[in-house]
Image (cartoon, grey):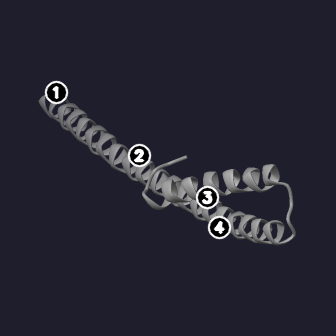
Amino acid sequence: MKLFILGAIIIIIIAVVLYLLLSYLMNVFSHLEEKREILSKAKESKKKQKLMEAELKTRQRILEQQIRTKVGMFYPMGEIRRLENELEQVNQTLDEIKNGGNI
């Protein structure tokens, strides 16, 4: 009878130790998964930011070309000012991106 009780106590102790070990391992792996998700989101965000920056630089070059063309062809000043304002907004957005600010 004593042997049976001793065996049961040992089995209970082993079960508790296994439970604690598995609980710890689940915590470790869940934190690793969260870290991996955060890193992938950061990578994706950086990719989107680079794409947006490239798109804005392209828009900037197009606007500069349009302004040069329209000034040379004596277009109405209202349209040229509109293009200059749009170019200024693009430049501000590019500066915000370069300085680390989010849009």
Q: Give the percent coordinates (x, y) of residue 56.
A: 66, 61
Between 25 and 95, the one nearer to me in the picture: 95
Determine which residue is flagged by label 4: 57
Q: Give the percent coordinates (x, y) of residue 95.
A: 50, 58
Horizontally, residue 17 falls left or right of residue 41, namely left
Label 3 crowd bin: few (<14), some (14–19), many (20+), radius 10 Å: few
Could you give the CA–CA distance between mark 3 and mark 1, rounded to whole angstroms? 70 Å
Q: Which mark is residue 1?
A: 1
- Write the residue at 71% across / 68% down: 64
Q: Earlier in the sequence, mark 3 or mark 1?
A: 1
Q: Secondary structure at mark 1?
A: loop
Q: Nearer the viewer, mark 2 or mark 1?
A: 2
Determine which residue is flagged by label 2: 30
Q: Nearer the viewer, mark 3 or mark 1?
A: 3
- Write the residue at 20% across / 36% down: 13
- Write the residue at 85% across / 65% down: 74
